[in-house]
Amino acid sequence: MKAKQSREMQTLVNKKWILEKAGTLFWQKGYDGSSMREIANACECRPANIYNYFKSKEEILYEVIKDNTEQTVSSVEHLENDETTDPVEQLKSFVKSHFEILARMKRSSVLISDTALKDLTDEHRKAIIQLRDRYDSIMRQVIRRGIDSGQFAVKDERIVGYLISSGILRSSLWFSTRGRLSTDEVGDVMFDFYFSGINAKCKS
Amino acid sequence: MKAKQSREMQTLVNKKWILEKAGTLFWQKGYDGSSMREIANACECRPANIYNYFKSKEEILYEVIKDNTEQTVSSVEHLENDETTDPVEQLKSFVKSHFEILARMKRSSVLISDTALKDLTDEHRKAIIQLRDRYDSIMRQVIRRGIDSGQFAVKDERIVGYLISSGILRSSLWFSTRGRLSTDEVGDVMFDFYFSGINAKCKS
DNA sequence: CCTACCGATCGGTAGG
DNA sequence: CCTACCGATCGGTAGG
């Protein structure tokens, strides 16, 4: 009984280990550019061993992207049905939460979630797109609440939503935790810029 | 004499043709995911023919990315040394010019310029990064002029520059010329949002 | 967790 | 001596 639990635990640990190493490799060399031999080397094992934990290379990619996207969604899902908090605070929370989780993931598998969607099976790709739709929906809910309260004014909610999430996401290309500004400071700059962009007081 | 000119002309036409087809393929399947056989198929020729125009697959990628980046830079370089035009108009011109050229390139080789930098030789990668630095520099000049004139107020020029260019660039993932809004209308929404974001009048 | 392989396909080049 | 292109194949490596 205990031995069985311990074995299952070890399996999970090994899976995590492989996903982390593979994610870094995918980020550095792309999905097609990373071979199972390279992943095995990074994991300090043989290629064949990987197949004890994953059915295919595609499944590893799926788990990497899914984990990544789920973390992103869960960083903002506390806003999903929040109809009481001030919409300005909600926007601040949204921007800073997503950016913070992104900064924590760092140097690994962030933009892979964009560019390697094409390498997923139809089923897996649909599952990821569903997660993203939920993220986009929460974003638009926050904007909608600010419009309803008269605090936000936008020409097009959908486009503004895309512009905000694009800026946050692509920060993984230029932001470093060892840079000039802290994660919190950069998050503040982002929020300030984006809030001004939709502040109803600026539109009259 | 005339025959030689015609031959050189044909070479240029064929190179353009290959670059266009390869660019589309790279966008759809990635660089590593596209084989020379597939590129040849798309070009309606044999793989070996491609080598009459390009030394290697990497050189094709380089030309695709270079062409793409050069188009982007030239869409905004009229602002490089413009110290007379109103900075607000300069921002509008920057945002709309870049977005328009992006919308015209469409469904081909736009985000490849990001993700396939790793597949270039060191020399080629440096050349592309130099072009990008020039784009970023022009962006910051425009912001700087607005700050000097008192029309813009930003917490951090560099970050705001990245946020703006990120939103424009990633539009290639969601914008379609056959969508709800025209290229010009979407460009206006973008400019309105970004100008409000840095409008000095909103910051007091 | 390993060695030993498979069918196929990779980027690139041979002679004619 | 050039180009554009053929069928076949080079040395290596892919996922499994």
Image: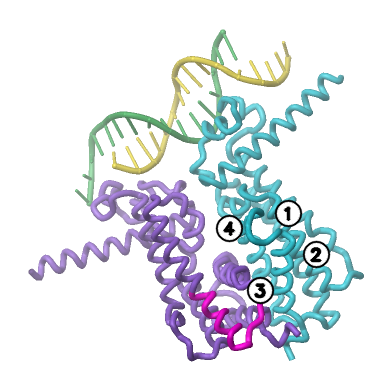
Chain colours: A purple, B cyan, C green, D yellow
* CA distance for labels 4 and 2: 22 Å
Type of amino acid under label 1 = Ile
Q: Element at badge 4? A: helix
Type of amino acid under label 2 = Ser
> Residue B182: horizontal and vertical position, in percent?
70, 59
Q: Earlier in the sequence, mark 3 or mark 2?
A: 2
Say which mark, if any, is on residue B93. 2
- Nearer mark to the viewer, of 3 and 4: 4
**CB under 8 Å between callouts 3 and 4?**
no
Q: Residue at x 62, y 38 (%)?
A: B21
In reply to whether residue A152 is colored magenta, the answer given is yes
Report how many numbered discs are placed on residues in the image. Answer: 4
Q: Earlier in the sequence, mark 3 or mark 4?
A: 3
Write down the region rendered in magenta.
Answer: A138-154
* Local crowd size for mark 3, using a 10 Å CA cut-off: few (<14), some (14–19), many (≥20): some
Look at mark 4 in the image and give the residue it sits on: B173
Look at mark 3 in the image and give the residue it sits on: B159
Q: Residue at x 48, y 52 (%)?
A: A30
* CA distance for labels 3 and 2: 20 Å
Residue A69 against residue B103 in the figure, above or below: below
Q: Element at badge 2? A: helix
Q: Residue at x 72, y 79 (%)?
A: B196
Badges 4 and 2, same chain: yes
Answer with the quarter of the image where residue A10 lies: bottom left
In this rendering, would A4 be left or right of C4? left
Q: Element at badge 1? A: helix
